[in-house]
Each structure stands twice: as structure tokens, then as C-alpha cells.
Amino acid sequence: MGMLEFPTTAGKIAAHFNATLLGDPNTPVEGLNSVQNASRGNLCFLSDKKSTQFLELLGIGAVVLTKKEFVRDDLSLTYILVDEPKVAFAQVAKSFMPTTQWKGISDKADIHPRAQVDPLAHIGPFAVVCDGAKVGPHTVVHPHAYVGQGVQVGAQCEIYPQVVLLVHVVIGDRVRVLPGSVLGSDGFGLIEGAQGHLEMPQVGTVVIEDDVRIGAHCTIDRGTLGETRIGKGSKLDDQVHVGHNCIIGKNSILCAQVGLAGSSILEEGVVLAGQVGVGDHITIGKGARVGGQTGVTANLKGGETYFSTPAMPLRQALRSHVYFRELPALAERIKVIEKEIHGNAKT
């Protein structure tokens, strides 16, 4: 399935998805919007019954990606019927974003003679590609990105401005690393000695598997020995820190400001909400979900939802928080009881 070109029409989008169209195929589509705010020339999506209330508010000429059961025949709208409206909208949105402003390899890029850059790669001005680095076909390295010595970047990747890939980092195919992220920096390993803290040399690497997304300003430390690994299809939000020798299983999700201490392991499909902290050498089981600001200090079984600090199963955590809110009143009751007991003792 190729990319759409904007501006376009409802008919062309329907043909792109081989979908049924209800309404005028010549209705223009010039932009994207939410179902709450779309107007003429906008494409939106409707994927749940609750949001059908917003259809009456749409301007005439809006185009709606939706399922057949959500269509309102009494409204002057154009509908494109698909099985998964949100997924289809995401695919359209990819086409809507502007493509890179350059093609080929800029003569202002600094590429070492022993670097191997595929002829189909795109290297922007002032990007640096060091000795022994490899950049695969159709990969885009944006201006001011740094690809360090011996780094391997696969095919169809996108390395955004100010990204730093340090020595011997390995990146698979179709990986996106957003602005300001640093991969392969030294892990925080200290040895306590008579003269103070000695830094343990970090001689391992970082391996990023295929189809991973790394958000802006993330830091992923290299292994002390061996590797730090991010599994296939995993998605990291902005400002995530992954310590040395961590292993993240495939299709995991780490939201903003998550921090993993060294050698922690996330099995497949783990979801960590914002600001979750995970202690060193902790294992979180397959499919576990951990709520925001939770502190994980012990291993967690897979398939459950956890919350609070220290982490506990969600229902237990919610009960504990109810009791916590009652502590001030309970303390006052205890004071009253103590006064009564001491008073009776004196008499």
C-alpha cells in the first residue's frame, strides 16, 4: 500500500483502502481533525458509539472514517467504511506528514572514508558518520545527528536531529529515534574503594531490534559487559531512561519519564505508565501493566495490573489507599481512646 498525496479526495482515500464510500467521492480532503472539530475539507475518524454524538456538530463536507453501524443517513457527511477506523486514520496521517526536505547524501555531511553508507540512504547536512559505521538503504539521518564508530543502522530507519549513537550501537530495520536521544552512553557502574568511587568501564553495547520507536531525549546506556537490548516492536515515549544491561521484551510500551535501573528485565508486552521506576535486577513478567508513578522494588508476575509504591496488585493498592486516607481520623480516634484508658487508670 503506497502513500497518499495531499490534498486529495474522499474517493481516493476509499480506493486506497479498498473501502466502501457513502457520499460524494469528490469531497476534498485537505487536512486532518478530530471528530469533535472537523469541518469541510477535514478527515476524521469515529471508532466508538459514544462519539456518534459529535456527528451532528460536524461541518458540511467533513469526511468520516468509520464503521457501517455508526453512519447517520440524515446528515450531509461523506463516510468511508473500514473495519478499524483508528488504524486507517493513522495510516492516512503518515502520508499527511511532510517528507524529508533532501534526497541523497549532502555534501555538507561529514562521512568517514571507511564508513559504509548505502547509496539509497539519505544523509542530511552536518550529520556525522564515523569510521566503520554502516547505514542501510532508505534510512534517513537528519542534520546534526551523530553516528559513532562501528555503529550499524539498518534499512528504512529515521535518525532525527541531535540524536547520538555511540560506539558499536546496533539498530535494526524501520527504527525511529527522535530528537535528542542518546544511545550507548556509559552505564552508571561504580566500585567503592579506599580512594572513593571508581567507575567500572562500560565495554558492552546497545541493540535495538526492528520496528522500535525511541522518543525524544531518551537515554539508553550500553551494557557493562554484553548488551542492553530493546525488543522488536517496542515503543518508548519521551525522556525514558534505560540502564545498563536491561532487556526489554518485544512489543513493550514505556511511557514518559520511566526509569529502569541496571539489569532489569521486562518480558514481552509489558506496559509501564508515566514515571514508573524499576529497581535493579528486577524482572516484570509477560503482559504486566504498571500504573503511573509506581515504584517496582521486587519481581512482578505477568498478566496483572500493578500500582503504588511498593508495587502491588491494583485492587490491593486501591484498598490500601482508602485506608491511607482514613489514617488522620483513625489517629484522632486512638487519641480519644488513649485518654479514656489513661483517665480510667488514674481513677
Image: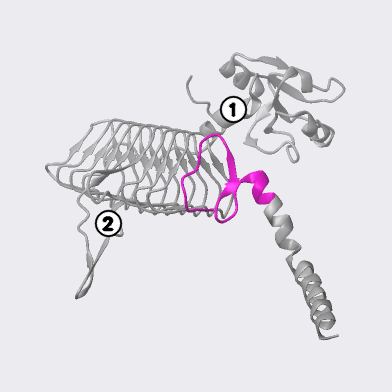
Asked whether 315 falls inside the magenta stretch, the response is yes
Write the start and end of the magenta stretch as one range. Answer: 295-318
Quarter in which the C terminus is drawn? bottom right
| Residue drawn at 79 percent across, 73 percent down | 332
Looking at the image, which residue sits at the far bottom? 346
| Residue drawn at 35 percent across, 46 percent down | 246
Q: Residues within 10 Å of mark 1 (few under 14, many from 20)?
A: some
69 left or right of 308?
right
92 left or right of 56?
left
* 110 to 234, vertically: above or below: below
Q: Position of residue 122 (x, y in %)?
A: 30, 38
Q: Which mark is residue 186?
A: 2
Q: Secondary structure at mark 2?
A: loop
Q: Position of residue 71 (x, y in %)?
A: 79, 21
Q: Nearer the viewer, mark 1 or mark 2?
A: 2
Amino acid type indicated by mark 1: Val
| Residue drawn at 64 percent across, 36 percent down | 32
Amino acid type indicated by mark 2: Asp
* 251 to 311, vertically: above or below: above
Q: Residues within 10 Å of mark 2 (few under 14, many from 20)?
A: many
* 205 to 155, vertically: above or below: below
* 18 to 9, vertically: above or below: above
241 left or right of 192?
right
Q: Position of residue 204 (x, y in %)?
A: 22, 47
Q: Secondary structure at mark 1?
A: helix
Name which quarter of the figure residue 212 lies in. Answer: top left
Quickly name the residue at label 1: 87
Can residue 333 be seen by looking at this rendering? yes
